[in-house]
Image: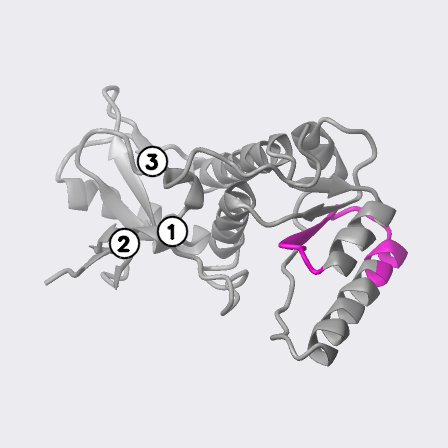
């Protein structure tokens, strides 16, 4: 029997049959045109079919015709379904980053990022995937100094998530700023909403592993629970 959790009743993967939380799965529905459609927000009407949060599993479901068998219907499965989901999740994550920026929770530029890290109120660091290695090294040193400072103060040391899957052009579009190589997130629901989507995207690309730290559980999307934002340090 499925147990009910905060994020809804558990479902089973159409490939592995493993029972998981909806936040650990991807939902699909069939549109009016008979085409299988990813339902990332789990809000589209119709009977859903689920796969684990994994590009490899989605590919296997297509190969085995598992969607058709589960739905007991003749449907059209897009040939580029795996890449389509990746593109949708990438766009969703960048839109969430834009929301965090509008809430005043994003600081960009090396000096500002270093200052946020030193303040002890850094929810995550974002680095352009095509940024210089020297900049990554210096940011890493700043994070290490912050960890040492917390430990010296008798506080619990937590690893700050480092988001490094977005190109500089993606960050520039999301934040509406030029030459974004380094950015820092201050705590807040919009920041957690972005991190939730980032973790899901990384897990999808890495076969349902990765980007899930013990101090930052993957379950529950804060943006589905709260629509108001506390003003961040950069709020206007």
Left or right: residue 216 compared with residue 98? left
Measure how far apart labels 1 and 2 are at the Cα level. 8 Å
Residue nearest the observer in this picture, 201 or 98: 98
List the single residue furthest toward the right. Answer: 134
Question: To which residue does mark 1 refer?
Answer: 220
Q: Is residue 39 visible?
A: yes
Which quadrant: the N terminus?
bottom left
Left or right: residue 168 compared with residue 32? right
Q: Quadrant of residue 224?
A: top left
The magenta stretch is 120-138
Looking at the rendered structure, the secondary structure element under dot 2 is loop
Question: To which residue does mark 2 refer?
Answer: 6
Q: Residues within 10 Å of mark 1 (few under 14, many from 20)?
A: some
Q: Residues within 10 Å of mark 3 (few under 14, many from 20)?
A: some
User: How far across and down, in percent of the image, does residue 67 sit?
Assistant: 24, 43
Q: Quadrant of residue 173?
A: top right
Q: Tally the numbered discs.
A: 3
State whether residue 53 is above or below residue 149.
Answer: above
State whether residue 104 is above or below residue 140.
Answer: above
User: How far across and down, in percent of the image, does residue 207 sit?
Assistant: 46, 59
Question: To which residue does mark 3 refer?
Answer: 39
Q: Are marks 1 and 2 in contact (CB under 8 Å)?
A: yes
Residue nearest the observer in this picture, 73 or 228: 228
Q: Residue at x 65, y 54 (%)?
A: 124
Looking at the rendered structure, the secondary structure element under dot 1 is loop
First along the sequence among labels 3 and 1:
3
């Amino acid at each position: 029997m499925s147990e009910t959790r905060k994020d809804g009743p558990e479902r089973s993967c159409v490939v592995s049959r493993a029972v998981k939380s909806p936040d650990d799965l991807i939902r699909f529905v069939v549109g009016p045109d008979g085409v299988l459609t990813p339902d990332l927000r789990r809000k589209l009407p119709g009977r859903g079919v689920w796969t684990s949060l994994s590009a490899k599993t989605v590919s296997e479901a297509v190969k085995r015709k598992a969607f058709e068998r589960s739905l007991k219907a003749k449907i059209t499965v897009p040939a580029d379904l795996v890449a389509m989901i990746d593109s949708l999740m990438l766009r969703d994550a960048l839109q969430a980053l834009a929301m965090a920026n509008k809430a005043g929770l994003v600081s960009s530029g090396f000096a500002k990022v270093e200052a946020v890290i030193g303040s002890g109120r850094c929810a995550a660091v974002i680095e352009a995937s095509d940024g210089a290695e020297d900049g990554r090294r210096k940011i890493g040193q700043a994070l290490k100094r912050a960890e040492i400072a917390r430990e010296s103060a008798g506080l619990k040391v937590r690893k700050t998530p480092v988001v490094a899957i977005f190109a500089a052009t993606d960050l520039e579009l999301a934040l509406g700023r030029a030459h974004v190589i380094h950015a820092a997130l201050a705590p807040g629901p919009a920041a957690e909403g972005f991190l939730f989507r980032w973790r899901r995207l990384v897990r999808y690309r890495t076969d349902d592993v990765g980007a899930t730290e013990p101090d930052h559980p993957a379950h529950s999307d804060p943006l589905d629970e709260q629509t108001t934002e506390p003003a961040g340090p950069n709020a206007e």
